[in-house]
Image (spheres, helix red, strand yellow):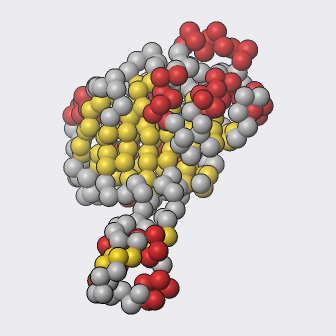
């Protein structure tokens, strides 16, 4: 699993920082999460192939999370894209995009599909043979969802020595990988554990931005490997965090601790702060495994 941060700062873009957007590479799928202004440029800078992006997940309709979307959609057309593009986001997103296309007399050379989210409960929005994506309902000034990306458990790994020892025919290998026991010709039943090894544990990634401190998300993100949680403010601005429905670094760490996640990635920093290291030092007083997101940084998990 690889996470590339294209932008992780709140509100307005600056020459040195970008609003929210990130690419999650999971089981060879490339999911774009949020699409703030400048996302196209950041994709180029970070050498992410445009053609790999088939699914875009938008958290909410504040500009710093989706103002880059129409630009990316029209660039896809200029690149003669033919593959379908799926956009997941709150009610209104389809209207906005289609209005912009219509009034600029533009169209797409590819299928553009919108998956409109309205539920206040967590729901599955994407699923294939290897990955499942669910929403994480967040509490913000407007309707907002985070997203939980989970690998599905992989097939069991064949124990070649064991299958040779029992002289098991190749045609049973898939059954063994699927966890089935095998009955030999003489009637003996060989337990699957003797013929295969456990697969690597499936990884999971939760993206939570923007939100006020909200313990209701804990059951949904429980035990995830990586939690990206917004931390717009430091403790000195905690009342502002509450007023604007954002989170402080310490509060994000509290969520990480209570949800028993393995690592916490902080981001969505207010541009009022010159030194983002302070987010880490404040959060570390609550939860030890802190990673600071920053534009252009990639993390492999
Ligand atoms: Zn924001
Ligand atoms: Zn917002």
Left or right: where does residue 239 sit relative to residue 74?
right
Residue 50, position as x, y percentages in the image: 41, 55
Q: Nearer the viewer, residue 256 or 189?
A: 189
What x and y, as percent, mark residue 276? 73, 32
Is residue 293 among the parts visible in the rendering?
no
Q: Is residue 252 above or below residue 125?
A: above
Above or below: residue 175 compared with residue 152: below
Viewer-proximal residue among 89 and 76: 89
Q: Nearer the viewer, residue 86 or 98?
A: 86
* Picture quadrant where residue 95 is located: top left
Q: Return the residue found at the far front.
A: 187
Q: Quadrant of residue 7?
A: top right
Q: Residue at x 44, y 76 (%)?
A: 195
Residue at the (34%, 52%) spot, across then down? 54
Q: Is residue 296 left or right of residue 182?
A: right
Counting from the top left corner in percent of width and height, residue 122 is at: 36, 31
Residue at image coords 49%, 70%: 197
Q: Is residue 206 visible?
A: yes
Q: How many marks?
A: 0
Q: Quadrant of the C terminus?
A: bottom right
Whether 141 is drawn above or below 271: the answer is above
The image position of residue 279, as x and y in percent, is 72, 29
Residue at screen point 24% across, 45% down: 112
């Amino acid at each position: 699993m690889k996470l590339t941060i294209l932008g992780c700062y709140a509100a307005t873009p600056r020459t040195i920082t970008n609003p929210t957007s990130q690419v999650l590479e999971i089981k060879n799928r490339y999911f774009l999460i949020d699409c703030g202004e400048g996302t196209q440029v950041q994709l180029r800078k970070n050498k992410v192939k445009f053609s790999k992006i088939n699914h875009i997940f938008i958290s909410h309709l504040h500009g710093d999370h989706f103002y880059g979307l129409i630009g990316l959609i029209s660039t896809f057309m200029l690149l003669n894209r033919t593959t379908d593009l799926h956009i997941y986001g709150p009610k209104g997103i389809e209207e906005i995009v289609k209005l912009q296309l219509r009034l600029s007399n533009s169209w797409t050379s590819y299928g553009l599909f919108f998956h409109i989210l309205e539920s206040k409960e967590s729901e599955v929005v994407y699923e294939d043979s290897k990955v499942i994506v669910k929403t994480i309902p967040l509490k913000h000034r407007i309707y907002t969802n985070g997203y939980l990306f989970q690998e599905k458990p992989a097939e069991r790994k064949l124990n070649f020595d064991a299958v040779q020892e029992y002289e098991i025919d190749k045609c049973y290998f898939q059954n063994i990988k699927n966890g089935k026991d095998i009955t030999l010709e003489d009637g003996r039943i060989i337990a699957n554990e003797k013929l295969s090894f456990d697969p690597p544990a499936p990884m999971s990634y939760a993206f939570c931005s923007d939100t006020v401190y909200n313990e209701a998300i804990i059951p949904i993100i429980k035990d995830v490997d990586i939690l990206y949680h917004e931390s717009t403010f430091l403790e000195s601005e905690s009342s502002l965090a509450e007023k604007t429905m954002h989170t402080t670094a310490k509060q994000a760490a509290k969520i990480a601790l209570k949800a028993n996640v393995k690592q916490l990635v902080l981001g969505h920093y207010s541009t009022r702060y010159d030194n983002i290291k302070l987010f880490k030092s404040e959060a570390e007083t609550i939860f030890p495994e802190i990673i600071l997101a920053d534009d252009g940084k990639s993390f492999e998990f």
